[in-house]
Image: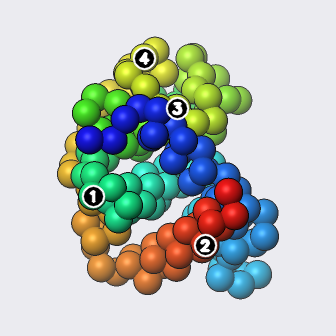
Amino acid sequence: MITEKLLKTEARRFREAILKVNESGGFSVDSFHKDRMDGFPNDCCDDVSDLFSEYLFKKYEECSDKVTGSYYDLMLKKDCYHTWLEIDELIIDLTGYQFLSNPSIENKCTDIFVGRKGIFHSQFNECYREKSWGIQSLNDACWERMYRNFNMIQQNMKDT
C-alpha cells in the first residue's frame, strides 16, 4: 500500500514534469493543434488524473478511483466538472488550483493536494466514480495521444 508521504512526493515530481513539458511546448502537436494538456492546469483535470493513475499503476501496481464532481458555475450559468483521484480515502488532485480566480468556487485548493477530503473537494457533488489503472482503462481512441503525453512526462521525471 502506498503511503500519503510517498503520494505527495510522487505527485510533486509528476506535476513538475508536466510543467517542464508544457513550458517546452511538448503538449502541442504542432502550432495549429494544441493538446488539452497545453493549458495545464486549466481544463485538463481528467487527463492529468488518467496520466497520474497510469504512473501509479505502472510504478506501484496501485489502482485508484477516478472521481468526477460537479459544481454550478455562476458566470457560465451551468454545471461544470472537476476530476481527481482517490486511493484509500486519500484525494490526489494536481489541478484543483485552476479555480483560484473562479468566484463560483468559494474554497480554494493548493497546487498539489494529497490528503483527506476537506472543504475544497466537498464543494463538488460526486457524479462519477470509476476504477482506474491508467490509460488502458480508457477508450482506445485516445491511447496514442495519452501515451505520447505520458512518455513525455515520464522522460521529464528522470530529471527531478
* Image quadrant containing the C terminus: bottom right
The mark found on residue 155 in the picture is 2
Left or right of 150, for residue 140: left
Left or right of 27, for residue 122: left
- How packed mark 2 is, by other alpha carbons closer than 10 Å (few <14, some 14-19, many 20 or more), is few
Q: Nearer the viewer, residue 101 or 7?
A: 7
Q: Nearer the viewer, mark 4 or mark 1?
A: 1
When the figure is inspected, residue 70 is found, relative to residue 17, above or below; the finding is: above
Q: Nearer the viewer, residue 13 or 116?
A: 13
Q: CA distance from mark 1 to mark 3?
A: 21 Å
The residue that mark 4 highlights is 118
Look at 63% across and 66% down and name the residue there.
158
Q: CA distance from mark 4 to mark 3?
A: 10 Å
Q: Is residue 91 visible?
A: no
The residue that mark 1 highlights is 61
Look at 25% across and 66% down and name the residue there.
137
Query: Which comes before the other along the chain, label 1 or label 3?
Result: 1
Whether tag 2 and tag 1 are in contact, CB under 8 A, the answer is: no
